[in-house]
Image (cartoon, rainbow, N blue to C red):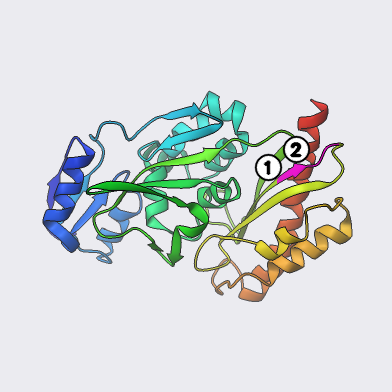
Amino acid sequence: MNAFDYQAPRTVDEVLALLREHGDDARVIAGGTALVTMMRQRLVLPGCLVSLRDVAGLGGIEATKGEIRLGALTTHREVEVSPLLKERLPVLAETFRRVATVRIRHMATVGGSLAHADPNQDPPVTLMALDARVEVRRAGGRREVPLSAFFRDYYETVLEPGEIITAVTVPLLSAASGAAYVKFLPRSAEDYATVAVAATVTLEAGGERCREARVALGSVAPTPLRARAAEALLPGARPDERLLHAAGEAAKGEVNPLTDHRGSAAYKREMTAVMVGRALTQAWEAARRSIRGP
């Protein structure tokens, strides 16, 4: 690694002041699971690391007004094992459980993984399908960004210089709703997915037709993305093989994957269609179970 200064502020205001002072030479570090690797590879060479580890108020999981708030420093492991999330948003706990290894999950943070903006990560896919929002702080104020508008390109977000993520807010599922996360793994359970899909489905009264649905995709474009064309086919429809096939085909037309060791671009497009059908099937069944009970 290159030589660097290490700062350990204790408040958000101190963090923002350090970022103003050091400018482009500073990088924020939380869990460090991605940044340290990039520094070892000399892909980034910061002159100053600003640690968030001792900053008060950036951790924790809480439920307020029909939403779950995840502090930016909440680790993947904390999300995975949270009794609150297992009860209120089990799809989110399950998604975080499937990230890499338990050692990584003990270090990686919710905010850090979003700021890293790797399009192959698991959590952004489910968070996007759940319509999550990112809370951002900057000197003199704060703003909130829908996660669907947060990513710009490979490893690039809408965060401006001097801004940090402080929390992620996730709406709870409404009545008669279900959610699912599925991914196709090319090798081991710790690997990135060839294709990842999360879906939420809310049913109309009676439980037969879809009222609203969201479908999010990962590992198949420069950023995680909503499959808007697929979503548009679902309101008012009943789940059948023809509908699921059409939704998968629509999603296939929205992706822009790269060929790599996890599969060719053409293969990833075909798997997108397959996995969208599976995710919607599981989400639809979960929504029905929410109506009729276990």
How far across and down, in percent of the image, does residue 2 sit?
15, 61
Disc 1 + disc 2, Cβ < 8 Å: yes
Give amino acid for label 2: Ala
Please report the residue visible at 35 percent of the width from the left and 54 percent of the height from the top.
Answer: 34
Please report the residue visible at 52 percent of the width from the left and 46 percent of the height from the top.
Answer: 132
Is residue 192 on the magenta stretch? no
Q: Is residue 261 left or right of residue 239?
A: left
How far across and down, in percent of the image, does residue 199 sit?
67, 49
Give amino acid for label 1: Ala
Q: Quadrant of the C terminus?
A: top right
Q: Which residue is mark 1?
A: 179
> What are the residue bounds of the magenta stretch?
201-205
The disc, 1 or 2, on the residue closer to the chain's N-terminal end is 1
How far across and down, in percent of the image, does residue 16 sit?
20, 47
Q: Is residue 239 left or right of residue 123?
A: right
Secondary structure of the magenta portion, mostly?
Answer: strand
Q: Quadrant of the N terminus?
A: bottom left
Q: Nearer the viewer, residue 65 or 114?
A: 65
Other residues around mark 2 within 10 Å, as few (<14) / some (14–19) / many (≥20)? many
- The secondary element bearing badge 1 is classed as strand
Tell me the number on the disc at residue 154.
none
Please report the residue visible at 44 percent of the width from the left and 66 percent of the height from the top.
Answer: 152
3D distance between C-alphas at marks 1 and 2? 6 Å
- The secondary element bearing badge 2 is classed as helix
Determine whether 92 is above or below 194 in the image: above
Q: Which residue is mark 2?
A: 286
Please report the residue visible at 53 percent of the width from the left and 34 percent of the height from the top.
Answer: 67
Other residues around mark 1 within 10 Å, as few (<14) / some (14–19) / many (≥20)? many
Residue 4 in view (yes/no): no
